[in-house]
C-alpha cells in the first residue's frame, strides 16, 4: 500500500547506528577469509613460479607436494589475478601470437577487366549434409559475372578450368581476389594465374568483409523472389543458376552501379543509357521545377571501386561525354 518492502520499513523505523570509519565489505573479517600473511606467501610463490616460466597451477601443486596447503586452487588464481604487476607472468604462445598479422588487401579498379573476385557458395539439397557448390567469378568494377559453374564438390581442377574458360572468353584481369579457402589457394590455380601474369590476393583470416563483391552477388542470388531454396539434383541447380546469371548480367538493375546492368557497365554501353535518363530527368525538372529544391543530377557508376580503399570525402563519378 505504501510502496515499501517490509525490510525497508523495519530499517527506517530502527536504523543501525552509523560508524565513523566504516569497513568496506571486501575488507571485513570473516571465518573463511585467508589472512594477510598467507596471501603474501601465496603471492610470492606465484611470482616465483612466473619468473621460472610456470603457471599458477604448477605453483599450487608444487606447494601442495611439499605439504603446504594455504588456500584452495581457486583462491590461488584469485590472488594471482589481483597482483598489480603482471609483467612476470609468462605469455603462452597462441595461434594469434605465433603468426604475423596479414595486411589487409587493398585493391582499386578504375575500369572493367582489372580485378576479378571469386568465391564458392552452397546450394542446399533435400539431403542433410549434402550441398551443391556454386562457383562464381565477378568483375568488381562492372559487377558482371564472367565465370561460373555448379558442381557436387569443391575442386582445385574445376576452379582452374572455370578460370581458363573465363580468361579465354573475356581476357585476363590484372588481379584475382578470393578468400583463403583451399580451392582459392590451390597450387593449380596459382600456377595458371602466375603463367598469365595475373596477381592473386586473399582475405585476412576470419575477416568476411575483405571479399564484399562476391558476398553481395551471392546474397542477390539467394534472395531472388524465385530462388528455389532446395535443389533436387545437379541438373536442376545448373539450369537455375544459368538462368540467374543471364538475368543478373543482362537485366539486373544493380544499385551499386547506379541502376545500370552489369553488362552495360562492362561494355561501356551505359553512357548512352545515361544520356537518355538525363534527358528525361531534366525534361521532368523543366516541367515541374516546384517539386525540386535544385536541378537534379543523374547518377552514374563510380569512377573508382575497390576493396579496403581509404575513405574519400567526395568520390569521383563518371560522366557521359
Image (tube, rainbow, N blue to C red):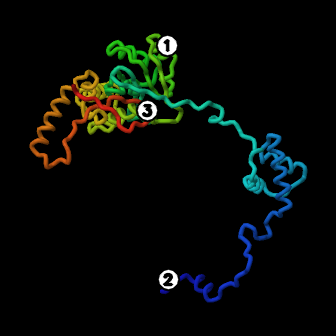
Q: Under tag 3, what secondary structure?
A: loop
| Residue 3: assigned label | 2
Nearest to N terminus: mark 1 or mark 2:
2
Q: Is residue 20 visible?
A: yes
Q: Is residue 162 visible?
A: no
Q: Nearer the viewer, residue 253 or 304?
A: 304
Measuring from the top left, give residue 222's x and y in whole percent.
34, 36
Measuring from the top left, give residue 1's x and y in whole percent.
48, 86
Q: Residue at x 45, y 26 (%)?
A: 178
Q: Nearer the viewer, mark 3 or mark 2?
A: 3
Q: Nearer the viewer, residue 4 or 227?
A: 4
- Up-down: is 7 above or below 293? below
Give yes or no for contact between labels 1 and 2 (Cβ–Cβ under 8 Å). Answer: no
Q: Residue at x 43, y 31 (%)?
A: 307
Q: Under tag 1, what secondary structure?
A: helix
Quadrant for the C terminus, please.
top left
Which residue in the protein does label 1 denote?
191
Is 302 left, or right, of 104 in this rendering? left
Residue found at the very far left of the displayed protein: 287
Q: Residue at x 33, y 22 (%)?
A: 112
Measuring from the top left, give residue 224's x and y in whole percent.
29, 37
Give yes or no for contact between labels 1 and 3 (Cβ–Cβ under 8 Å). Answer: no
Tell me if mark 1 has few (under 14), some (14-19) or many (20+) residues whose alpha carbon lies within 10 angstroms of its own. Answer: few
Residue found at the very far bottom of the displayed protein: 13
Q: Under tag 2, what secondary structure?
A: loop
Which residue in the protein does label 3 denote?
309
Find the distance from the CA under tag 3 to the CA under tag 2.
60 Å
Amino acid at each position: 500500500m505504501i510502496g515499501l518492502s517490509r525490510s525497508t520499513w523495519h530499517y527506517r523505523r530502527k536504523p543501525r547506528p552509523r560508524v565513523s570509519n566504516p569497513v568496506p565489505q571486501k575488507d571485513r573479517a570473516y571465518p573463511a577469509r585467508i589472512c594477510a600473511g598467507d596471501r603474501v606467501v601465496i603471492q610470492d610463490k606465484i611470482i616465483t613460479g612466473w619468473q621460472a616460466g610456470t603457471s599458477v597451477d604448477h605453483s599450487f601443486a608444487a606447494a601442495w607436494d611439499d605439504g603446504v596447503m594455504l588456500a584452495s586452487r581457486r583462491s590461488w588464481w584469485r590472488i594471482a589475478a589481483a597482483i598489480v604487476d603482471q609483467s612476470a607472468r609468462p605469455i603462452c604462445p597462441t595461434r594469434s601470437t605465433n603468426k604475423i598479422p596479414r595486411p589487409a588487401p587493398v585493391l582499386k579498379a578504375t575500369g572493367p577487366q582489372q580485378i576479378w573476385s571469386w568465391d564458392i557458395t552452397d546450394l542446399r539439397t533435400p539431403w542433410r549434409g549434402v550441398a551443391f557448390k556454386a562457383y562464381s567469378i565477378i568483375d568488381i568494377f562492372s559487377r558482371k559475372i564472367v565465370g561460373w559453374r555448379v558442381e557436387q564438390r569443391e575442386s582445385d581442377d574445376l576452379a582452374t578450368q572455370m578460370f581458363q574458360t573465363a580468361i579465354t572468353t573475356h581476357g585476363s584481369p590484372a588481379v584475382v581476389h578470393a578468400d583463403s579457402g583451399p580451392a582459392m589457394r590451390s597450387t593449380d590455380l596459382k600456377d595458371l594465374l602466375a603463367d598469365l601474369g595475373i596477381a592473386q590476393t586473399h582475405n585476412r583470416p576470419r575477416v568476411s568483409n575483405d571479399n564484399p563483391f562476391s558476398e553481395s552477388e551471392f546474397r542477390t542470388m539467394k534472395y531472388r523472389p524465385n530462388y528455389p531454396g532446395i535443389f533436387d539434383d545437379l541438373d536442376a541447380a545448373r539450369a537455375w543458376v544459368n538462368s540467374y546469371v543471364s538475368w543478373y548480367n543482362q537485366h539486373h538493375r544493380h544499385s551499386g552501379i547506379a541502376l545500370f546492368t552489369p553488362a552495360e557497365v562492362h561494355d561501356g554501353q551505359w553512357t548512352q543509357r545515361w544520356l537518355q535518363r538525363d534527358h528525361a530527368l531534366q525534361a521532368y525538372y523543366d516541367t515541374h521545377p516546384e517539386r525540386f529544391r535544385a536541378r537534379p543530377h543523374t547518377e552514374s557508376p563510380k569512377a573508382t571501386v575497390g576493396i579496403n580503399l581509404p575513405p574519400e570525402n567526395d568520390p569521383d563519378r563518371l560522366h557521359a561525354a
